[in-house]
């Protein structure tokens, strides 16, 4: 059986693909270790460290107390001393209690040392809503981190990219914030999403940070998006294709660096752009993409840019209200139809 044939047969959830990437790097480099709340025997609340404790032991897979400032600071110190920590912040919503370590230390030390001190650390965190977990466990907040210089921000949407981006993040000499939406993980206790399971090569490989991917080619409009919204956009694109509307879906995969060239190339091809973002609408990703097009060549657009994002309210707990604010397939389809007809 060829490697390609084995890859086609082997399908993993996004969570399992992440674990495999971490494990391969831990075997390759003894300086790689994992630290965070419930990453040991529990295997990570979203399954991102399952089995690592059994293989690598408690010296390299360390459960921590609920003290985000303390263990993220410990990770920064370990990275400065030459190790390559993967530190899990269980929910990105918890960033408020530990932002000093993230932004004033992890992100700035390289600058403050004149480039002499590296901080090769991965800050792994879960984002996103859709399962009634309320205002303090359902945000994405990637634009908040992308706004602050000094950190790379990666946001995979599928199992193959999740593994390759994790390996790239671990090998990167810069701090990388690695953000995964719970809805793409393939978790048994969440609503199953068919795109959360996919083919993943067994061998080690990197997916380059800062390179977007065309998830689906089209000619009538470009949907620029990331993470779980890629799945929704692909579902909508397949549905509209039956009516003769062909959407191109651009999966950003990274926010920092942002692949502006890929955005401009796709918009130049279709002339219409819809930004779908599960982060807040104001002062975020959708505005950055609009500015990129306006600054480079506003004549690319045949119609005004459209966006589907979370309105500027905290994520509601009540399921009907939560669905009303999230970028659901229904909202994406309505916006796409309006854009193509404009």
Image: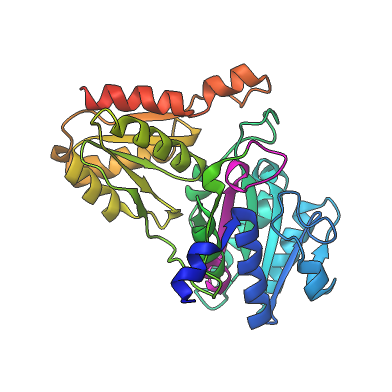
At x 47%, y 75%, the residue is 3
Image quarter (top left, top right, bottom left or bottom right) of the C terminus: top left
Residue 59 drawn in magenta: no
- Image position, residue 266 (x, y; %): 24, 47
Question: Is residue 273 left or right of 254 when viewed as pictured?
Answer: left
The relative height of residue 154 versus residue 56 in the rendered view (above or below) is above
Res 165 visible: no
Question: Is residue 314 left or right of 161 when viewed as pictured?
Answer: right
Q: Quadrant of residue 313?
A: top right
| Most distant residue in the front direction | 1
- Image position, residue 262 (x, y; %): 28, 53
Instruction: Give the color scheme: rainbow, by chain, secondary structure or one colour.
Output: rainbow
Q: Magenta stretch: give its range.
A: 168-191
At x 56%, y 23%, the residue is 323
Q: Nearer the viewer, residue 72 or 6?
A: 6
- Image position, residue 102 (x, y; %): 64, 56
Q: Nearer the viewer, residue 234 or 116?
A: 234
| Most distant residue in the left direction | 299
At x 76%, y 52%, the residue is 68
Res 101 visible: yes
Q: Which of 286 and 163 is in front in this view?
A: 163
At x 58%, y 70%, the residue is 170
The relative height of residue 52 versus residue 97 in the rendered view (above or below) is below
- Image position, residue 34 (x, y; %): 73, 66
């Amino acid at each position: 059986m060829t490697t390609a044939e084995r890859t086609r047969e082997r399908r993993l959830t996004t969570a399992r693909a992440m674990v495999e990437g971490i494990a391969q790097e831990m075997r390759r480099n003894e300086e790689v270790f994992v630290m965070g709340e419930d990453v040991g025997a529990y295997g990570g609340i979203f399954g991102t460290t399952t089995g690592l404790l059994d293989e690598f032991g408690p010296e390299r897979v360390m459960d921590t107390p609920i003290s985000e400032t303390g263990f993220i600071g410990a990770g920064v110190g370990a990275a400065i001393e030459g190790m390559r920590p993967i530190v899990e912040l269980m929910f990105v919503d918890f960033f408020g209690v530990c932002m000093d370590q993230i932004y004033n230390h992890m992100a700035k030390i390289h600058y403050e040392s004149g480039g002499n001190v590296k901080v090769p650390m991965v800050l792994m965190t879960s984002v996103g809503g859709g399962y009634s977990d309320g205002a303090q466990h359902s945000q994405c907040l990637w634009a908040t981190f992308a706004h602050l210089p000094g950190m790379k921000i990666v946001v995979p949407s599928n199992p193959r990219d999740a593994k390759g981006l994790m390996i790239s993040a671990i090998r990167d000499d810069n701090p990388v914030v690695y953000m995964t939406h719970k809805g793409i993980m393939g978790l048994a206790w969440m609503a199953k999403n068919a795109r959360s399971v996919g083919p993943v090569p067994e061998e080690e490989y990197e997916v380059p940070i800062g390179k977007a991917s065309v998830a689906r080619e089209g000619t009538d409009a470009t949907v620029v998006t990331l993470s779980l919204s890629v799945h929704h956009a692909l579902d909508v694109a397949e549905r509209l294709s039956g009516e003769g509307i062909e959407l191109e879906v651009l999966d950003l995969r990274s926010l920092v660096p942002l692949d502006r060239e890929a955005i401009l190339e796709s918009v130049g091809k279709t002339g219409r752009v819809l930004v779908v973002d599960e982060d807040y609408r104001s002062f975020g990703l959708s505005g950055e993409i609009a500015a990129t097009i306006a600054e480079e060549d506003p004549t690319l657009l045949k119609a005004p840019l459209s966006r589907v994002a979370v309105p500027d309210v905290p994520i509601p707990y009540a399921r009907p209200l939560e669905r009303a604010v999230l970028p659901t397939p229904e909202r994406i389809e309505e916006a796409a139809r309006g854009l193509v007809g404009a």
